Amino acid sequence: MRPLCAWNHGPGVLSARLVLGAVVLLTGHFVFPIHPGSLPPAHGADGHYSGKQGHIVVVQVPTDDAAAQLQGKFLGRSIRFFPDPRLEEPKGFVGLLGIDLQDEPGSHELTVEAQSGESRQTFRYQVLVQKEKFHVEHLTLPKDKVDLDDKAVARWKAEQEQVKTALATDSQVKLWQPGFVEPVNGRRTGIFGSVRIMNGQPRNPHNGEDISAPLGTDVLATNDGIVRLTVEHFFSGKGIFVDHGLGFYSMYFHLSEVLVKDGDQVKAGQVVGKVGATGRATGPHLHWGVKLNGARVNPYALLDLPFRSSTPSAVPVPVADPTVGVGPSVP
């Protein structure tokens, strides 16, 4: 049996200096290896954008008004904007719009509120959410890896509240830097968004990537941030939640060791834990997850964002046998 999670980790007019022409670059969910620099062509010059479930949309707003403040809304979720760090791009702001793996396909409105001094303006764009063809996995697992008794359900619900409370307030500044790091090299044994049929019972889609690696392998922080919460939970086992600022979180589950504590500042590539099989897991592996303003997105999409550093990221390894390293599925 391949090591993976036996669960799915969860049941107005502006100043003339402010030129708002949104340009959208799409990065997204790649089931197989991502090749750096392989970004799809830019879209959105006509105010209509698109992206598949689990993708990340980079919204670029050119302006030379460094004091401007921008905030977006999409399907009830906030889109935070920050100064564009790319020297090769025109001055302006960018925002990361995450399309959740279960967002309803179809056209949805993105609104951007922009303020400069006493001037305020609202811009509206249409975003076409496209359905992703997620993988379907049929798994046969021991009954105790799938079904929960009342005590386990109560514990799981309490743990979900703990996470919700801890992540309710995030850092209001961008902590991450250009260049994202794959946390561990290994075989991909659980694919983001895959629909799991466990012992004949359909479960929630898998909201992260399972990466099989030997017990005790170093797990690296994907970017700079603050450790918001460390846990030892029923499903996820020993885990770490890192706040990268502006509503962007990364998660690392099923660890054998946690080498950081709540409140620690971490840097990209820093060892934060060790690969394990704690919680509901069928073998040593890392469950790597990402939430972007509440949207569950493919973590490998981070490696293809148009923000580069001189430090190369690891190349994803092709998907392995789907029966090695499964973790439990939340009811």
Image (tube, rainbow, N blue to C red):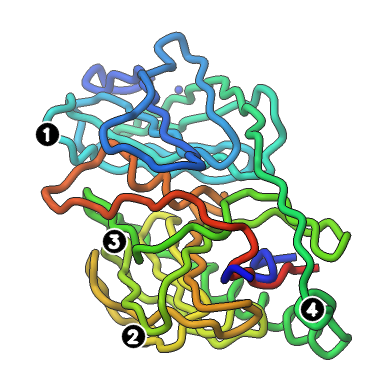
Say whether disc 2 or disc 4 marks the residue closer to the N-terminus.
4
Mark 2 vs mark 4, CA separation in Å:
33 Å
Residue at image location 42% in from the left, 49% down from the top? 300
Kindly state the secondary structure of the residue where label 2 is placed. Answer: loop
The residue under label 3 is 223
Please, what is the three-letter code of the amino acid marked with disc 3? Answer: Asn
The type of residue carrying mark 4 is Pro
Q: On the picture, is 231 further left or further right than 171?
A: right
Q: Which mark is residue 87?
A: 1
Q: Residues within 10 Å of mark 2 (few under 14, many from 20)?
A: some
51 relative to 248, above or below: above
Give the residue drawn at x 74%, y 56%: 196
Instruction: Report how far apart the C-alphas of labels 3 and 1 lie in the structure.
Output: 20 Å
**Precedes in sequence: disc 2 or disc 1:** 1
The image quadrant of residue 308 is: top left
Cα distance between the residues tagged 2 and 3:
15 Å
